[in-house]
Image (tube, rainbow, N blue to C red):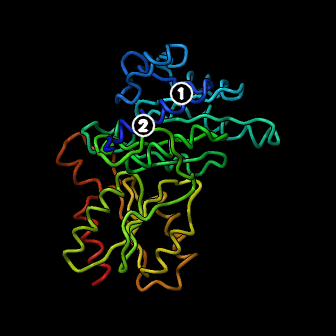
């Protein structure tokens, strides 16, 4: 049945809470209000306020409490209302949750998920529109996921909640209203496995989150230009499916990496290295990277639209690479 990305996230939480009484949801306004974006609507009525917990406005405090819950055998799912505010969780997440398994020689686990809306395109301005996934990709011990459609969002979130490691789960705000076929009930998507959203023969467009949607739109436009583009949706950023990247680029012999985050110091540089290290000998032209502008996201709708890659910019870049 068709469901929006937002409904798929709610479904995943419902499935997880229904099957495991140790799963709890924590965050600002996740109870009666239904979450900042509406992802927890109906859960407090079904599972009570003891499992859908409205917290004070202190991301550091309630994320730290979630780490403690996870260490004691619970499976907390924390909602941070904007990914920009995950910077306030840096100490409990980076210095504690990501390290306890290693520091305890494997005797302790921190099975928790931090769900958080990311990205630009909604007029939310500089402090509510960032792509901050890069901050967490350099932290051993963390899993980082960023699905692009409703089917993947539900399956990956269920897998994340059942994992015994801490997970950063990024949900793009522009993906929330987008619909796709989503099965009823519980299902799982393997963490660490990319997906070929569209097969092609001329170039591999490698991306994740909402930029995978833009890449699919660009691929449809490129078909009109006689160019066959393959779209690789990473879904899982850490662990990373390097095999699928290598196989795709090995077939198409060209690669364009698209991220919403700025290129400098970002994940696109790591992806470029993966391409060169695994499929470099097959390349017909240098790898290109396309990312957001090197500036904070503007409140102005017209300026914001120019800051982030879109289908037309992807199309233009691909045509330049094939010229």
Q: Quadrant of residue 207?
A: bottom left
Q: Residues within 10 Å of mark 1 (few under 14, many from 20)?
A: few
Q: Residue 90, percent across and down?
A: 57, 35
- For marks 2 and 1, give the one nearer the viewer: 1
Residue at (62% x, 30% y) in the render? 75
Please report whichever mark, 2 or 1, sits nearer to the chain's N-terminal start: 2
Q: Residues within 10 Å of mark 2 (few under 14, many from 20)?
A: many
Say whether residue 322 is visible: yes
Q: Residue 262, percent across and down?
A: 39, 55
**Residue at image mark 2:** 9
In this rendering, position of residue 299 left or right of residue 109? left
Looking at this rendering, what residue extends furthest in the left direction?
302
Residue at (56% x, 62% y) in the render? 241
Q: Quadrant of residue 259?
A: bottom left
Q: Which mark is residue 187?
A: none
Residue at (59% x, 47% y) in the render? 143
Q: Is residue 74 above or below residue 7?
A: above
Q: Residue 258, percent across and down?
A: 38, 62
| Picture quarter with the N terminus | top left
| Picture quarter with the C terminus | bottom left
**Residue at image mark 1:** 18
Residue at (22% x, 64% y) in the render? 312
Query: Which element type, helix, strand or loop, lies under badge 1?
Result: helix
Q: Is residue 52 above or below residue 178?
A: above
């Amino acid at each position: 049945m068709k469901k929006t990305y937002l409904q798929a996230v709610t479904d995943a939480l419902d499935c997880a809470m229904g099957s495991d009484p140790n799963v709890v949801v924590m965050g600002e306004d996740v109870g009666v209000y239904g979450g900042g974006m509406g992802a927890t609507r109906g859960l407090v009525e079904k599972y009570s306020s003891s499992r859908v917990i409205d917290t004070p406005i202190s991301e550091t405090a309630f994320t730290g409490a979630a780490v403690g819950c996870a260490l004691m055998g619970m499976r907390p799912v924390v909602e941070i209302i904007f990914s920009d505010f995950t910077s306030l969780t840096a100490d409990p997440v980076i210095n504690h949750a990501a390290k306890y398994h290693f520091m305890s020689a494997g005797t302790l686990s921190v099975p928790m998920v931090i769900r958080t809306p990311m990205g630009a395109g909604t007029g939310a301005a500089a402090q509510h529109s960032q792509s901050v996934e890069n901050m967490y990709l350099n932290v051993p011990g963390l899993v980082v996921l960023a699905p692009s459609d409703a089917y993947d969002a539900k399956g990956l979130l269920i897998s994340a909640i059942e994992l015994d490691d801490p997970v950063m789960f990024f949900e793009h705000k522009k993906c929330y209203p987008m619909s796709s076929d989503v099965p009823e009930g519980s299902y799982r998507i393997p963490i660490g496995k990319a997906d070929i959203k569209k097969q092609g023969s001329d170039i591999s467009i490698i991306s994740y989150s909402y930029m995978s949607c833009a890449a699919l739109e660009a691929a449809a436009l490129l078909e009109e230009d006689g160019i066959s583009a393959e779209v690789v949706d990473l879904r899982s950023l850490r662990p990373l499916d390097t095999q699928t990247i290598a196989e795709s680029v090995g077939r198409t012999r060209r690669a364009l990496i698209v991220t919403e985050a700025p290129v400098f110091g970002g994940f696109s540089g790591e992806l470029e290295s993966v391409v060169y290290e695994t499929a470099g000998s097959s390349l017909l032209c240098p790898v290109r990277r396309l990312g957001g502008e090197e500036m904070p996201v503007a409140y102005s709708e017209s300026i914001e639209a120019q800051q982030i890659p879109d289908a037309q910019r992807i199309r233009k870049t691909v045509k330049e690479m094939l010229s």
